[in-house]
Image (tube, helix red, strand yellow):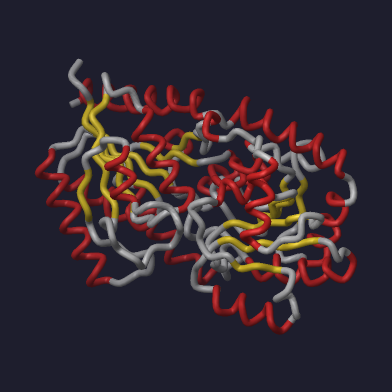
Amino acid sequence: MEKISILQITQSLGGGVQKYVIQLCEHLDPNRFRIIGCCSMGPGRENREDGDIPFSEAFQQIGIPYFIVPMQRSINPLKDFLSFLLIYKNIKKKNFDIVHAHSSKAGVLARIAARMAGVPVIIYSPHAFSFDGPKHILKKIPFILFEKIAAFFCDSIITDSPTEKKLALKFKIAREEKISVIPTSIKLNDYNPEIDEEERKEYLKILGIPKEHKIVTMIGRLSPQKDPITFILSSQRLKKQYQKVTFLLVGDGPLKEKCCKLLQEVELNGQMKVLGWRRDYKNILKISDLLVSSSLWEGLPFILLEAMAFSKPVVATRSTGIVDVINDGENGFLVPPRSPKILSDKIKWVLDRPEVATKVGKAAKKTVEEKFNLRKTIPQIEELYIQLYKNKIKNA
């Protein structure tokens, strides 16, 4: 059989979705698949949402050809229509066998464009539905309708977790047989938890952290979804009880100004450092004692798996995707969303029990090795691609 031509397309400018898509492109069998990427921004652009290399450069590094279509996260009818036309033009010209769209914006535009262009197989991975989270139902309705309409234009929806699939079924986004679960996974070879003591001292010196301090870290986009405000408020409570602790907030986004203002109001400037996006975030994870995830909703957060792969204990909210990874008290700790006091108390409880933190961290790494290992999930995706394509060709 000739190689199956696949387009991997996303609007995302970075973070977990970029890492996942690049991993996918890099590890799909090149003897069976010909991969082309599409992203929304080229190299050298500064208005990015993370500290990773630009998506286009990431494609270049792994030898994947790509093209660029300007897309934006927010809804803009005119710009979205122009993006749609460019996507359609490129798909029609390149004659793909499969289009795999990632995240909501590319998910809507590319699915419709691909169907109109006559692509045999169309797949969508939401990586967190846009209607999830504590929004009022009236605010959810437009996003639910977009997802329902776009679902008619695709053959399969891949969710990151069982709870994300349940969410899709709850709102009747698509029939159950159209929805599968293939979890977000990571390449374990990239996560050696060991760090040289001299390297650790150097990092602490660069960041201005006393060597005797515990380090509590949050890494993510500073957005309503990730809820950094709760992390700041919990840190304020904890600093009154726990003097030798430094809080690191790594990320950027629409809530950055609000976060910085809140830091001044709660007098946390001395103990919390807002680092922006860092390409060396893995080293920051290595020197951290604990990772916090205060998200209101997720698909399955990449940074959560990365921290667990580094054997770090995680305190996270009970939200979509996260509850499929963490068993409370066994391989991590769960707290309710938007609960600064409970989050603060749990962080202190973990910091006060280093032997428990070590045990839980080891269990966390084992969980990733057994259930969220890219080596195990890539074959599942390849099988889905091949099966869907064969069925379409057979029934054509």
Residue 360 vertical placement versus 370 (above, below): below
Image location of residue 197, percent across then percent down: 70, 42
Considering every residue shown, the one lying at the far top of the view is 1
Determine whether, in the image, residue 330 is placed left or right of residue 248. Answer: right
Image location of residue 282, percent across then percent down: 57, 46
Instruction: Report the quarter where the C terminus lies.
Output: top left
- Quick one: 29 or 53, which is closer to the camera? 53
Determine whether, in the image, residue 24 is placed left or right of residue 240. Answer: left
- Quick one: 141 or 135, which is closer to the camera? 135
Image location of residue 367, percent across then percent down: 67, 31
**What's the residue at 54%, 62% (across, down)?**
251
Instruction: Report the quarter where the N terminus lies.
Output: top left
**What's the residue at 67%, 80% (across, down)?**
262
Determine whether, in the image, residue 366 is placed left or right of residue 321. Answer: right
**What's the residue at 55%, 79% (across, down)?**
257
Residue 156 vertical placement versus 274 (above, below): above
- Quick one: 16 or 196, which is closer to the camera? 196
Residue 329 vertical placement versus 377 (above, below): below
